[in-house]
Amino acid sequence: MKKYNIAILGASGAVGQEMIKILEEYQIPVGTLLPLASARSAGSVIRFNGQDIEIKEATEDSFEGMDFVLGAVKNAMSKKFAPAIVRAGAVYIDNSSAFRMDPEVPLVVPEINGEDAFANKGIIANPNCSTIITLMAVAAISKISPIKAMVACTYQAVSGAGQDGLYELENQMKALAEGKAVERKVFPHQIANNVIPFIGSMTDNDYTDEEMKMQNEGRRIMHLPELKVNCTCVRVPVMRSHSIAVTVYTENPVSVDDANKAIAAFEGCRLIDDYEGRCYPTPLDTSDQDLVWVGRVRKDLIADNGLVLWCCGDQIRKGAASNAVQILKKLIER
Amino acid sequence: MKKYNIAILGASGAVGQEMIKILEEYQIPVGTLLPLASARSAGSVIRFNGQDIEIKEATEDSFEGMDFVLGAVKNAMSKKFAPAIVRAGAVYIDNSSAFRMDPEVPLVVPEINGEDAFANKGIIANPNCSTIITLMAVAAISKISPIKAMVACTYQAVSGAGQDGLYELENQMKALAEGKAVERKVFPHQIANNVIPFIGSMTDNDYTDEEMKMQNEGRRIMHLPELKVNCTCVRVPVMRSHSIAVTVYTENPVSVDDANKAIAAFEGCRLIDDYEGRCYPTPLDTSDQDLVWVGRVRKDLIADNGLVLWCCGDQIRKGAASNAVQILKKLIER
């Protein structure tokens, strides 16, 4: 069986560490695993398939001999290393947003537009976490009748801000429980016992860049260039699963029954219509696994062609690391 | 100056206690203050204007001589005592949902439809907390062009479940911080580090009764009998302020500038377009005060006649106790 040499660019972060865990869990046939990070994290050790592997400092010479590079670094680092990765002949699956809107770069959720990955020219972009989870929930409905528009309100976990986001919520909760002063570095306000309706940075139309990803990335992934999405992105004090309340407007009306059947049959989704006597998932239910759970599917009360639903998915897994490894899996299985 | 005898029905709960605090804060001219509760809470003592007053057990004979009764009890208790209150000649301002849809009973947010209160026949209903806060945020826009429809996603504080809800979140956060097992009684799932997309009970159309209040009560308060609202109510781990992400569709397009000006000028609202360098409120900002803070007003990306906004308001105050006392104030000031 062919084995693949795989580098993890950003191996010390929350997503990078999860990628390594998922490579092992999915039993990807790995030859060499090369964990890379900035000089600051180089030297520390990760565990993979029973072996300790030292994290090396990423340089432009790191990628020779690699078949794939999984990227879990910020945009600037991603842009810096992408040319060297492509030159080395590896396929770069990038979790940053650096290349997501590049028409030469496929933007892929394997269950939705997995075939797009095969057209890559060396780089494949992994979509935004909330976008992946939302689209997983609605993709089955779009097969019945194409989606024209969505209103999406997110309830985003702190893991979206990486390991530091996780620490910050944990520390703030501890401080509150002990009656101590709450400190913050990562989020612009206290996040424990609070919600923050602003993620990312402001754009010209008064939406944040995070909010615009749902429409912009959604259009590319769903092959719906006219898709319109009004999105509100909100950080909530939850560790690692994002939730999204979505109103979906389709070309023709879709019944709740048909939508439920399609969601239940869609790979990577789990329909929650009677789970432990309830009709909805919560973020805690979906922590640390890959499925996107979808529930509360009901008719919109405004328009005949509308459906309303609720979905939850693990931000670090399906929202980031698992989706990237699933793209890799799709490529090696062809 | 005329003084008014005022009974608080449900004086031991979170909303009842806040009503007493607000009567004092608003300097309502109170003659006798009569705190009432169930037999279980009778005998305990509340503090009002520097005096200790014992809570008495509520009976049908409790209301003689009262001018007003502020109700902060559940529907069954409210229905039980309402006839006795009206017989005693008092005006009953009821925070339960027992009478909200009764066409004989005005349903009032003073800043929006305060005049309706004068048509009461002895009972005035205080609206649902999320409904009050949402409508406060959009009422100014509806004056520019009537609102036809709304999509509302709520981020509701645990105080909506009363004092026990507050204790439950506090205890769960403490348990998590100490690495102990999380216990729950009030909410159907762990609420610390989680969100729960189901509040109230299921109705025939797959919305919860809590979700339908936004449309049903909104129609009465706004005098918009055709208003359509698709609502998703979600409990979040926040102590006492509700937040709502709202998309508003008006008869004619309204500009962001016009909407912002109208909101800024609307009594009871505070526009957040540049507050400490940010364009949004958080629930912590609005805790323990009456104003509804509104921010992030922007054009909908789906339809020309749509606006999107974010609002926060204290659930116990403007969402319940303050609104009730403001109705009382309106009646005595006429």
Image: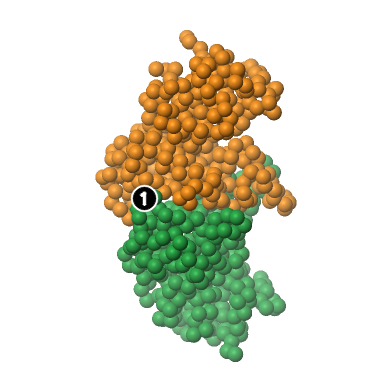
Chain colours: A green, B orange
- Asked if one can make out residue A119 in the rendered structure from this viewpoint, the answer is yes
**Front-most of residues B37 and B151:** B37
Question: Which percent across, then down, holds residue B12?
Answer: 63, 28
**Front-most of residues B317 and B104:** B104
Q: Could you tell me which residue is drawn at 39 percent across and 35 percent down? A: B220
Question: Which percent across, then down, holds residue A245?
Answer: 47, 54
Horizontal placement of A135 versus B35: left or right? left
Q: Quadrant of residue A259?
A: bottom left
Q: Quadrant of residue B113?
A: top left
Q: Could you tell me which residue is drawn at 62 percent across and 46 percent down? A: B187
Instruction: Tell me if residue B92 comes above or below residue B270 in the rendering.
Output: above
Disc 1 target residue: A302
Q: Could you tell me which residue is drawn at 57 percent across and 27 percent down? A: B80
Horizontal placement of B40 versus B159: left or right? right
Instruction: Tell me if residue A148 comes above or below residue A53 in the rendering.
Output: above
Q: Amino acid at mark 1?
A: Ile
- Asked if one can make out residue B111 in the rendered structure from this viewpoint, the answer is no
Question: Which percent across, then down, holds residue B50?
Answer: 62, 17
Instruction: Tell me if residue A46 comes above or below residue A130 in the rendering.
Output: below
Question: Which percent across, then down, holds residue B321?
Answer: 52, 30
Q: Could you tell me which residue is drawn at 52 percent across and 70 percent down? A: A268
